[in-house]
Amino acid sequence: MKKGLFITFEGVDGCGKTTQMHLLADYLREQKDCCVVETREPGAVGLGEKIREILLNYDGVVSPQCEAFLFLADRAQNIDVIVNPAIESRKIVLCDRHTDSTVAYQGYGRGIDIEEINELNRIATRHRKPDLTLVFDIDIETAMKRVGQDKDRMEGAGVQFFNSVRNGYLTLAQMEPNRIKVIDASRSIEEVQRDVVELVEALL
Ligand code: TYD
């Protein structure tokens, strides 16, 4: 690789993005001999895991602002400690959720001002933007069936919330068509993976 690449995976809970990220990592390592780093938000290795634990399992009151700042604190740590160093050493970084999650969930879902979130995202990421963002789009009924009964704090937010989040992602994709590509995630794992590989190969 002449330069590093930063690819983010987005979509509502149950869309299958995590499975697709791992499949792409295997493909890039085994078929393309690439050096790949996988990370996630919230919950990158180290401090991120502690922040994730609070965000997903704390059972008292969490204000929407506090929730947003915790996601952003986790992001700042992930960018500084994992993403930026890896990109600088010309690796391919795959990140399970990133800035668009905060816009979709805390902005479109919880109703925090989108411009404020954009500004906070710029600060947390030191203005780094993904080279490619894949949004795995799926109807909420199917997604919730995949999540099942055992829901964490975020997953228990309800169908109306998740419809707003989904519409948020689709709006973002319309606003930034070059960076954000929408993939129909209601199909089989193999069909979805073919689309992922095609989009990523165009960048290599
Ligand atoms: P995720 O790791 O995708 O959950 P899972 O373990 O079920 O795959 O994401 C954790 C949750 O956090 C998910 O419900 C989305 C939410 N989230 C936000 O609300 N805002 C954010 O900025 C991020 C990164 C995640």
Image: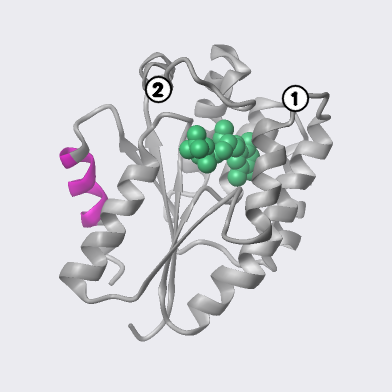
Q: Which residue is mark 1?
A: 59
The residue drawn where x is 52% and y is 82% is: 88
Contact flag, marks 1 and 2 (Cβ < 8 Å): no
Q: Quadrant of residue 160?
A: top right
- In the picture, measured across the screen, residue 161 lies left or right of residue 106, that is left
153, above or below 35, in the image: above
How far across and down, in percent of the image, does residue 73 sit? 75, 54
Q: Which residues are magenta?
A: 190-198
How far across and down, in percent of the image, does residue 126 sit? 70, 68
- In the picture, measured across the screen, residue 50 lies left or right of residue 144, that is right
Can residue 102 be seen from the camera position used here?
A: no
19, above or below 138, in the image: below
Callout 2 crowding tier (Cα within 10 Å): few <14, some 14–19, many ≥20: many
Q: Secondary structure at mark 1?
A: loop
Q: Give the color scheme: rainbow, by chain, secondary structure or one colour.
A: one colour
Q: Can you tell which mark lies on residue 107?
A: none
The residue drawn where x is 23% and y is 40% is: 192
| Residue 196 within the magenta-colored segment of the rendering | yes
| Residue 126 within the magenta-colored segment of the rendering | no
Q: Which image quadrant: the C terminus? A: bottom left
Q: Can you tell which mark lies on residue 143?
A: 2
